[in-house]
Amino acid sequence: YNIPHMLVSDPGQLDEAVRRLGFPMIAKPPAEAISYGVRRVDDMAQLVEAWQELSGIRRSLRGQPRSGDVLLETYVEGVEVSVETMTVNGHTHVFGVTSKDLFGDPAYIECGHTFPVPLPDEERDQLYAAVVGTLEAIGYDHGPCHTEVRRTESGWRVIEANPRTPSSCMTMLVTDVTGRSPILDAWLLTIGEVPAIEPVRHSGGAAVRMIYPQRRGVLERVDGVEAAASVPGVQVLLHVEKGDHLLQRMDNSACVGFTYCSGPDRLEAQALADKAAAHLDFVVEDGTREL
């Protein structure tokens, strides 16, 4: 289920990486978060540029030391989803499958999610087998995991297995649909309790839309919040305020908030979350209005 990859610690290895992986490929830090630094490279010039930038960053977003190594992977086409799980004493419980909406090339930044994604029984079983098999192979036997997977012509291919609860309101999606809180279950595991996770039943659907400004600037105000919040079933969750610096969309750190909706169906919830997001206008100090 793994994708062909190579960890590069010296620029002299780039030619070998091209021979082994070919173009296009994905370049990213071997350990980070929020899609920071992830990009597609299509030729040697882009690969060298990605190497120079990523290898030069020696502190993570959390302030932890980085080695300067760069992880290169063969690019695989396919629809990407994530699988949310909780492993207790070596047994992995699956909450369900989350959709992943992406902006696309050259960076792969998430712009929204829905839960749960319905799949035919055979396809779902193959996906779960890929995820559970991956966690068993790496010896992950206790705790939450957020595993990103792509459905390719050759089957499910694991992109990343992240040993943590997911971000961007995905735990809210799971909680509203299943009645189980991955965060609470993880806390219980931490203090030595065994959460009663199974059986997991789905009821309704939920969606979240991630909000990004289109230009840099100092935030003056956000218009349309009341109109967005008036959309049935929608919560508006912003984490910026007047005076904050808005970033351009390069990774998920530029996200300024969410519109969130739960309801009887994930696609209906997605439409309502999108409708609410369309009401939001971000105005920066120079008077520019950001949609």
Image (tube, helix red, strand yellow):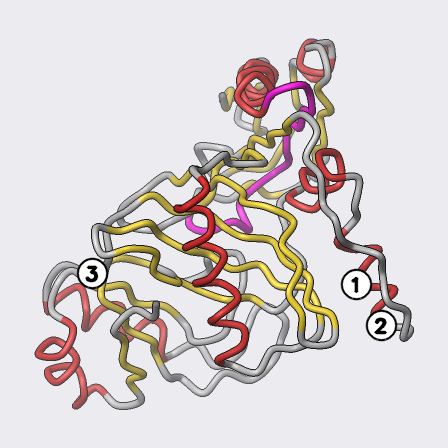
Q: Which residues are magenta?
A: 250-265
Name the residue carrying label 2. 190
In the picture, the disc for residue 41 is 3
Tell which tag, 2 or 3, sits nearer the viewer.
Answer: 2
Expressed as whole percent of the image width and height from the top left, the position of residue 207 reads 60, 30
Q: Secondary structure at mark 2?
A: helix
Q: Is residue 268 above or below residue 195?
A: above
Question: What distance separates the C-alpha of mark 2 from that of mark 3?
Answer: 40 Å
Binning the other alpha carbons within 10 Å of mark 2 as few (below 14), some (14 to 19) or many (20 upward) gives: few
Residue contact at pointers 2 and 1, CB within 8 angstroms: yes
Name the residue carrying label 1. 186
141 inside magenta stretch: no
Q: Is residue 122 above or below residue 130?
A: above
Q: Amino acid at mark 3?
A: Val
Residue visible at 36% across and 68% down in the picture = 28
| Sequence-earlier tag: 2 or 3 | 3
